[in-house]
Image: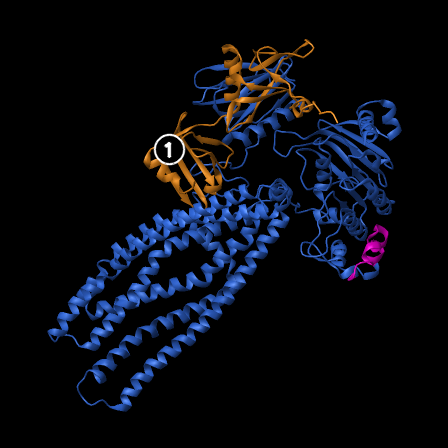
């Protein structure tokens, strides 16, 4: 390592906690130079020599993270920070170790945007959208852009809204004519004109209803098209995100994005946008008419409106959180119910029915309490706001009553005016609720775009090639950790030749499945490279890489559908001949022909239940049908009893014949046919060789075999 | 048939540590331990790691003492069973690993679009943090305690919900 004194650090890491147990925050910075580390903590400066430092690490505490150095005389604590700094610290550790390995002290890459540049609050995990600063307008604009192909439907519905609003304003006018000219005029009415007036009211109503139908139709088309597009985009995006990114979110959360959030957006487009236009038009139209008719009276009606709007907003602000709690408690009760029913065998076995009953009772009673309290609040508040809303009508009544008695207003005029007043309250009530609706929609819009905007960390390069991969699999200096800084695999080097069967063995948690995930490019290594036939797998399209790989895992996922479809999942265009051939080789055929519905038997959640062995056979049939060049077996038989495993082994032999195979198995006897065995220990390759070579070596593999033999003797 | 006198505790083979068989010492920035086995042999560990078995309920009881491979060397039933200087070493190390500020007062709590933004006064000063899905991020422990987990992975404790001032409690109440 270079020992020359340098004036500027190659890495700087900020921290906010004291290295001791002190609770108060202590802001500081650690500057890393090739020969020393200078730590400033506001109070003092400490210098630590890098002489003898072998490795850096970042163990996590609870609510804090440490940066430590592994020195010759033991570990040294460099800094301690809250979890806001966890990604920076982990990234720094990665770069520091790289510098130790390579001797090149490059400056740390900027870790892009962990904090919102505007409010300096951290982004939610896996997101680069600040929930606080997200620009509503920007998202609505994007939604609008997304709706481009379907905008004509939206335009049509807006025009229809416009017409309906105008027509609705005509009804009070015709009513007035009816009252003043014919009902209350004192003259003998002309029947023909009377009928015309009634017919006009009827006609206006019919036209309005018909237009409403057309409007609903066009709106539904528009919103459905937008939503289908949106769901397609999200679904596609989620499918293309790396395993790491997808794993950060629960499946329930992802399902919510695709169904619930898009549903909220759909409701907004179908109901709210149209209604907003209608209500605003109505408000403007009626407002203008009222003011034109009698501005003093109009003012009397409008006057209490700010109070009404304010009271509505206050009411909902108050009730929103309460309804939120009610929803949360309801969901909690459902979770308990789901838990109990799905675990009913355990409940019965331990005789805990009474305790479970009490748990559920407690939960529904809590919900009942908040529900009752919410209903009470609503019952008290709602009449008050309704009264406030109607205050204007009392003013109106007093005013028009006086006017009629004074002879300055006719009954018809009063009727028309009252109808307009009634028409103006509707939009006002609706608009008072608008911010709440908009907030709900924006929550969903932001969440949806959050997924859409997420960048996949295992993305295909623009110049990635789609080619059949063949040749050696070469793993060169590969290091990887699921959380940066905490390495699972360290500096792995391995070459797998075509047709070889490689068995990967080692204790649980040693990184066997991780290595396989890297070969399949579910993740990208932090350091080093994996290539097939000399081409880095990052230069290939993921589709072409995985097309060549067949996988049999410990647990086989069966999709709801027929046995046939489950086998053909890996090759949807397979002919029945091909499916039966694969089934025969894997041993599926043997049990398929015993089923009443044969290959048409419905399996999955609501269908025929396959045994563990049968499921694995389906998985092998799938892989055979896929006809891959590389086979990955990840504990393919470990969930099976020895007898079934023996049967499955024969099927597996059919699968792996002539193909490059990488197999993981706890039961070492499963790997007896392996060309070579790779023993992993503490994230590193500890031993490589054939069974005989490793047994002679009497190392880790020998110990593992001996331990298993001991176990089987005991069995 | 004779009664089996071999208990589950025997089968578990837990090594309980107390002042008779364990001595802890500070070693550089960390702590080490000298442990005495049942046969009287001593082993010195330059660094040991402490782990709370019940981090919510028993902060200084059932503390697992581990080596760097996270293998348990022994279990401290109660830190209080050690001499005072030893207790100080153990408590300090635990406090350093488990950083959980205690919230004394909630200044503001605003919720928008599925996130809530908090400004609180804690035992370590004024703090701001963000929660995603507020109700799910608050765990009630017993009737009067709560833990809050923010989006970064920090956690905060409210030792006594009933001890909060009215305003703070009102802000929090609906998420409990």
Q: So how many labels did they put on this image?
A: 1
Query: In the rendered image, which quarter contains the N terminus of chain A?
Result: top right
Q: Residue furthest left?
A: A406
Residue A142 x %, y %:
49, 54
**Residue at the spot 67% in from the left edge and 56% down from the top edge:** A606
Residue A38 x %, y %:
52, 17
Report if residue A224 is visible in the image. Answer: yes
Q: Chain of mark 1?
A: B
Q: Nearer the viewer, residue A673 or B166?
A: B166
Q: Verify whether residue A513 appears in magenta.
A: no
Report if residue A135 is visible in the image. Answer: no
Q: Is residue A334 above or below residue A120?
A: below
Give the secondary structure at mark 1: loop
Over which residues does the magenta segment extend? A578-597
Residue A116 x %, y %:
46, 38
Residue A508: quarter of image: top right
Q: Nearer the viewer, residue A209 or A712?
A: A712
**Residue at the spot 61% in from the left edge and 32% down from the top edge:** A484
The colour chain B appears in is orange
Residue A296: quarter of image: bottom left
Q: Is residue B74 left or right of residue A7?
A: right
Which residue is labeled 1 in the image?
B162
Q: Is residue A365 above or below residue B26?
A: below
Q: Is residue A386 left or right of residue A403?
A: right
Residue A98 x %, y %:
65, 26
Q: Verify whether residue A589 appears in magenta.
A: yes
Q: Is residue A312 above or below residue B64?
A: below
Q: Nearer the viewer, residue A626 or B100?
A: B100
Q: Any idea which chain is the blue one in this picture?
A: A
């Amino acid at each position: 390592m270079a020992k020359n004194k340098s004036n500027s650090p190659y890495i700087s890491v900020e921290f906010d906690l004291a290295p001791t147990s002190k609770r108060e925050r202590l802001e500081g910075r650690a500057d890393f130079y090739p020969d020393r580390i200078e730590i400033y903590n506001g109070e003092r400066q400490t210098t630590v020599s890098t002489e003898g430092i072998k490795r850096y690490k970042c163990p996590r505490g609870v609510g804090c993270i440490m940066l430590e150095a592994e020195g010759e005389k033991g570990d040294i604590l460099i800094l301690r920070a809250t979890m806001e700094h966890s990604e920076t610290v982990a990234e720094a550790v990665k770069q520091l170790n790289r510098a130790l390995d390579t001797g090149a002290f490059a400056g740390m890459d900027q870790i892009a945007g962990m904090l919102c540049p505007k409010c300096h609050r951290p982004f939610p995990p896996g997101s680069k959208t600040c929930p606080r600063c997200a620009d509503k307008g920007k998202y609505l604009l994007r939604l609008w852009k997304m709706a481009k192909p379907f905008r004509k439907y939206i335009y049509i519905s807006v025009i229809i809204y416009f017409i309906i609003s105008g027509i609705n304003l005509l009804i009070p006018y015709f009513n007035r004519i009816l009252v003043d000219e014919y009902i209350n005029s004192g003259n003998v009415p002309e029947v023909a004109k009377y009928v015309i007036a009634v017919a006009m009211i009827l006609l206006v109503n019919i036209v309005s209803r018909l237009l409403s139908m057309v409007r609903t139709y066009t709106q539904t088309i528009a919103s459905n098209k937008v939503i289908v597009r949106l769901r397609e985009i999200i679904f596609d995006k989620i499918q293309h995100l790396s395993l790491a990114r997808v794993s950060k979110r629960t499946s329930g959360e992802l399902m919510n994005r695709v169904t619930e959030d898009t549903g909220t957006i759909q409701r907004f487009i179908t109901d709210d946008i149209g209604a907003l236009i209608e209500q605003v038009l109505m408000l403007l139209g009626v407002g203008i008419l009222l003011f034109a008719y009698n501005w003093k009276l109009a003012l009397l009606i409008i006057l209490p409106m700010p109070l009404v709007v304010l009271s509505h907003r206050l009411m909902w602000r108050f009730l929103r959180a309460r309804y939120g709690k009610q929803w949360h408690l309801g969901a909690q009760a459902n979770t308990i119910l789901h838990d109990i029913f799905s675990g009913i065998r355990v409940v019965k076995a331990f005789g805990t029915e009474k305790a479970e009953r009490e748990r559920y009772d407690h939960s529904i009673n809590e919900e009942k309490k908040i529900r009752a309290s919410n209903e009470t609040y609503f019952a008290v508040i709602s009449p008050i706001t309704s009264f406030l809303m109607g205050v204007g009508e009392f003013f109106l009544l007093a005013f028009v009553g006086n006017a009629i008695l004074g002879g300055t207003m006719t009954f018809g005029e009063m009727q028309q005016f009252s109808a307009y007043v009634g028409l103006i309250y509707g939009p006002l009530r609706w608009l008072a609720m608008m911010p709440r609706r908009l907030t709900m929609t924006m929550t969903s819009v932001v969440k949806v775009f959050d997924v859409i905007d997420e960048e996949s960390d295992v993305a295909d390069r623009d110049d990635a090639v789609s080619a059949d991969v063949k040749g050696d699999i070469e793993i060169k200096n590969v290091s990887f950790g699921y959380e940066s800084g905490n390495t699972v695999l360290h500096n792995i080097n391995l070459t797998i030749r075509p047709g070889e069967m490689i068995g990967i063995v080692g204790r649980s948690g040693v990184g066997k499945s991780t290595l396989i995930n890297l070969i399949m490019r579910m993740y990208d290594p932090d350091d080093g490279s994996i290539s097939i036939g000399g081409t880095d797998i990052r230069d290939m399209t993921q589709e072409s890489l995985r097309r060549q790989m067949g996988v049999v895992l410990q647990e086989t996922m069966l999709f709801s559908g027929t046995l046939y479809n489950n086998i053909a999942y890996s090759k949807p265009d397979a002919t029945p001949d091909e499916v039966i051939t694969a089934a025969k080789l894997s041993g599926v055929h043997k049990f398929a022909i015993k089923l009443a519905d044969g290959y048409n038997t419905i399996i999955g959640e609501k269908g025929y239940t396959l045994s563990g062995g049968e499921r694995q056979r389906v998985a092998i049939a799938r892989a055979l049908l896929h006809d891959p060049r590389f086979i990955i077996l990840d504990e393919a038989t470990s969930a099976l009893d020895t007898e079934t495993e023996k049967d499955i082994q024969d099927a597996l032999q059919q699968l792996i014949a002539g193909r490059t195979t990488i197999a993981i198995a706890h039961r070492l006897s499963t790997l007896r046919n392996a060309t070579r065995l790779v023993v992993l220990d503490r994230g590193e390759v500890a031993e490589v060789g054939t069974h005989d070579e490793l047994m002679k070596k009497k190392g880790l593999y020998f110990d593992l075999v001996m331990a298993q033999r001991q176990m089987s003797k005991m069995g | 048939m004779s009664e089996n006198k071999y208990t589950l505790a025997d089968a578990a083979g837990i090594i309980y540590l107390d002042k008779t068989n364990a001595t802890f010492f500070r070693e550089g920035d960390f702590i080490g331990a000298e442990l005495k086995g049942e046969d009287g042999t001593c082993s010195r560990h330059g660094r040991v790691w402490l782990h709370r078995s019940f981090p919510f309920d028993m902060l200084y009881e059932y503390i697992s003492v581990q080596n760097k491979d996270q293998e348990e060397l022994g279990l401290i039933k109660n830190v209080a069973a050690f001499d005072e200087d030893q207790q100080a070493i153990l408590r300090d190390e635990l406090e350093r690993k488990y950083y959980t500020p205690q919230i004394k007062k909630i200044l503001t709590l605003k919720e928008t679009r599925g996130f809530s933004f908090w400004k609180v006064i804690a035992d370590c000063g004024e703090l701001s943090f963000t929660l995603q899905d507020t109700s799910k991020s608050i765990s009630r422990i017993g009737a009067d305690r709560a833990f809050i987990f923010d989006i970064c992975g920090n956690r905060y404790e409210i030792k006594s919900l009933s001890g909060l001032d009215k305003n703070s409690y009102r802000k929090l109440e609906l998420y409990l």
